[in-house]
């Protein structure tokens, strides 16, 4: 039990750091230096205003200095960090694979939040992520370099063809270049075998959310769910985590 508590607290702290990345990276600000600050009044925050989850409620969801509302994204990302850390520990307890899939999962959380807020999947995360996945495949026992390379190439190429075909058919851009690079990163970390389930799960989740939005807005009959504009990165990220943390039969020799 003590190990789970420590892992969860570590995940909360990581989620707090990811909030800094999510806030500063799209604005091209350094996120690895300097104290956390309010994104509105820019005042550096004291440590007691940076306690994951707790400070958000103690401050009554507002900045101590300017009173501006703190977006709910902050506690949600912190909670996501804690829950993902717990899930990874349960899947790979004490394994060195935590040092591989921990950063990968953290990148997925950050990319999801940025895409939801800004419709952006920064190259500064996805491109180094592809390279890191390929490099790690050189030493991972369960994933060969060629499996990772084929996963990156096939994932990126497939989504590129889908995006090209959709735009050629409709004259509208349906999938951005960020989604293509994210799929390549997922393929590099999880291998080519991960692509079918990740695509299937992400498409299913996207369809369900589109249907839910259409029903909530009372626009089912108009067919809005077929053309709803949604950032696809979060669905890909969630599908990759489901695959990574899912049944052992999806893997060959992965984990304990």
Image: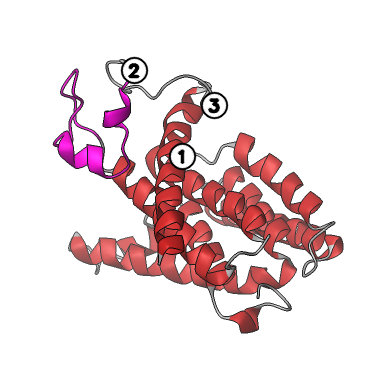
- Count neighbours of disc 1 (C-alpha within 10 A) and say few if under 14, some if 14 to 19, many if 20 or more: many
Tag 3 or tag 2, which sits nearer the N-term? Answer: 3
Position of the N terminus by quadrant: bottom left
Circles 2 and 3: CB atoms closer than 8 Å: no
Per the image, the residue denoted by label 2 is 44
Q: Quadrant of residue 154?
A: bottom right
Rendered location of residue 181, percent (x, y): 65, 48
Q: Residue 32 has which mark?
A: 3
Q: Nearer the viewer, mark 2 or mark 1?
A: 2
| Nearest the eye: 136 or 71 | 136
Q: Is residue 68 magenta?
A: yes
Q: Is residue 120 magenta?
A: no
* C-alpha distance separating marks 1 and 3: 11 Å
Q: Main secondary structure of the magenta part?
A: loop
- Count neighbours of disc 3 (C-alpha within 10 A) and say few if under 14, some if 14 to 19, many if 20 or more: few
Q: Residue 18 has which mark?
A: 1
State the residue lying farthest toward the front. Answer: 2
Rendered location of residue 95, percent (x, y): 65, 64
**Residue at the (27%, 61%) spot, across then down:** 213
Residue 55 falls left or right of residue 60? right
* C-alpha distance separating marks 2 and 1: 17 Å
**Residue at the (63%, 43%) spot, across then down:** 126
Residue 171, can we see it?
Answer: no
* C-alpha distance separating marks 2 and 3: 15 Å
Q: Secondary structure at mark 3?
A: loop
- Count neighbours of disc 2 (C-alpha within 10 A) and say few if under 14, some if 14 to 19, many if 20 or more: some
Q: Which residues are magenta?
A: 44-70
Rendered location of residue 106, percent (x, y): 53, 49
Q: Secondary structure at mark 1?
A: helix
Circles 2 and 1: CB atoms closer than 8 Å: no
In the rendered image, the vertical position of residue 88 relative to residue 193, given as above or below: above
């Amino acid at each position: 039990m003590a190990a789970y508590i420590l892992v969860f607290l570590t995940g909360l702290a990581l989620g707090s750091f990811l909030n800094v990345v999510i806030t500063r990276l799209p604005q091209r600000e350094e996120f690895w230096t300097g104290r956390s600050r309010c994104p509105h009044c820019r005042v550096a925050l004291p440590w007691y205003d940076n306690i994951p989850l707790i400070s958000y409620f103690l401050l009554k969801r507002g900045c101590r200095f300017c009173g501006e509302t703190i977006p709910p994204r902050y506690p949600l990302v912190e909670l996501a960090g804690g829950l993902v850390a717990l899930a990874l520990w349960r899947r790979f307890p004490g394994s060195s694979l935590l040092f591989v899939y921990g950063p990968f999962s953290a990148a997925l959380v950050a990319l999801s939040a940025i895409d939801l807020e800004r419709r952006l999947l920064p190259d500064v995360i996805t491109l180094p992520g592809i390279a890191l996945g390929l490099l790690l495949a050189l030493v991972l026992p369960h994933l060969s370099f060629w499996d990772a390379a084929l996963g990156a190439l096939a994932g990126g190429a497939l989504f590129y063809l889908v995006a090209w075909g959709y735009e050629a058919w409709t004259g509208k851009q349906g999938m951005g270049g960020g989604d293509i690079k994210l799929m390549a990163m997922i393929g590099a970390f999880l291998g080519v075998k991960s692509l079918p389930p990740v695509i299937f799960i992400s498409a299913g989740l996207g369809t369900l959310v589109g249907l839910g939005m259409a029903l909530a807005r009372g626009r089912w009959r108009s067919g809005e769910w077929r053309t709803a504009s949604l950032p696809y990165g979060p669905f890909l990220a969630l599908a990759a985590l489901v695959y990574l943390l899912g049944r052992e039969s999806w893997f060959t020799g992965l984990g304990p």
